[in-house]
Image: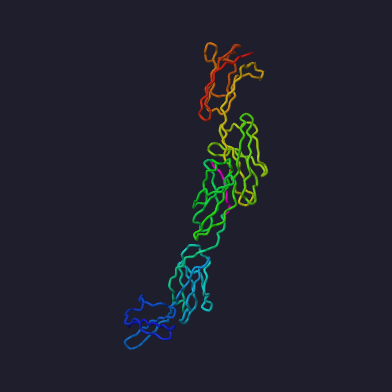
Amino acid sequence: VSYVVMQSQDGGQTFVDIDSGIVGDGFNDFVKINPGDTVSNQCFKVEARDACGNIISSETICGIELQGEAQNNRNELVWSMYEGPNLDSFEVIRDGVRIAYAPSSLPSNPFYDSLVICGEVYTYEIRALIDSGAYTSSSNFLEIKSFSTDTPNAVTTPLVTTNLDNTVVSWDSGFNVVEYSVFRELNGSVGLNGRTTETEFPTDVQDRIDLRPCYTIRYLDSCGNTSPITIFQCPVVLEVQPAPNLGHSLTWTDYRGWPAGVAYYEVQKANLDGQVFFQEPLDSSTFMWTESGIDTSFQDFYYRIAAVQASGDSLISISNWELIEQEFRIFYPTAFTPNADGLNDVFVGKGRFIKEYKMVVMNQWGEVIFESKEIDIGWDGTYKGNESPVGTYIYQVEATDEKGHNFEEKGTITLLR
């Protein structure tokens, strides 16, 4: 048995031999044919011929020619009508995956693919399913690079917040972004602060906090379109008026840029590692607060203000961090009366921010009669279980504060009965 490949250029009306004398079992054999300029009206079939003149013909399969172009936000595909018999349906294939199915009675030609991303290249083909899918005719492959001239949407949920190192502007990702641009407004003048491909950008706001900076973001997409800028985001600016022995006074500006505004503010205190140890919420119309007394939780700490967004996102913006450095102090009385009346019975120091401590008390001959390594443990006026006589005694103190600073003091204390 020999096989003959036959070609028709009139839609299957007449055929001519184009390759004959192929000998084989009829399976896994193929022939490459140059169809010329177009395949839209070309059809093919294979005949099996034996020495007795018997002929068996295959199904007639016709070619499909696919054309197309990119349009704004969509790709258009147009293909030639299938000329052969027993057509069931068409399939639209994109990057090897079927994205549409069209019965032969409704070929959906032209076809518009709107699920495209600007700047992406897609490879299309059209497949004709013939005789209940027993045969397939595939078109040429067609590559189309999509484009868009539409202005992309602005980024959402912009936020400006401050940490120990710097202030960070952040936002949700835009669509098909090439680069973000962050702009800063200082004292009425707007300028480019920097560019990034990430969705956050660290700034140098701590250096210019006195000018109350505000920020906005826009981006460039892969088709060269620029998004609108966001609403300017202006973080809270905190000022602290120190009052070391009375209580510090805090004032701050409002957070600007959230359409729904601020739900509430919160005064926070954090240690030098940034861990918050104090929080007091205040309503959104309050912009001042005064410390009641002296906070001895840490020798040095930060004040900061948290602004909480009044919307479903509940974003939190942190103001600049204001460092409070408190002095190491120890106070001693000049006299005490160890007479068991509950008043001034013990010679003891009062201090704050003490990490290490040692106090010794000596009599007039320099003999040590009392020693303590705890500031809360003082001398009760006795020595070896006996009451010490009325008179003047010498005390000497060595101490170290929480920051490692050393302190020494030497003085006298009068014992009265």
Colour setting: rainbow
Between 53 and 319, the one lying in front of the other is 319
Between 130 and 66, the one lying in front of the other is 66
Residue farthest along the bottom direction in this orientation: 52
Between 377 and 100, the one lying in front of the other is 100
Residue 30 visible (yes or no): no
Quadrant of image for the C terminus = top right
The quadrant holding residue 54 is bottom left
Residue 137 visible (yes or no): yes
The quadrant holding residue 380 is top right
Magenta-colored stretch includes residue 157: yes
Q: Which residues are magenta?
A: 156-163
Residue 360 relative to residue 28: left or right: right
Between 416 and 69, the one lying in front of the other is 69
Q: Is residue 128 above or below residue 398?
A: below
Magenta-colored stretch includes residue 139: no
Residue 120 relative to residue 351: left or right: left
- What x and y, as percent, mark residue 154? 57, 56
Quadrant of image for the N terminus = bottom left
The quadrant holding residue 298 is top right
- What x and y, as percent, mark residue 107? 52, 76
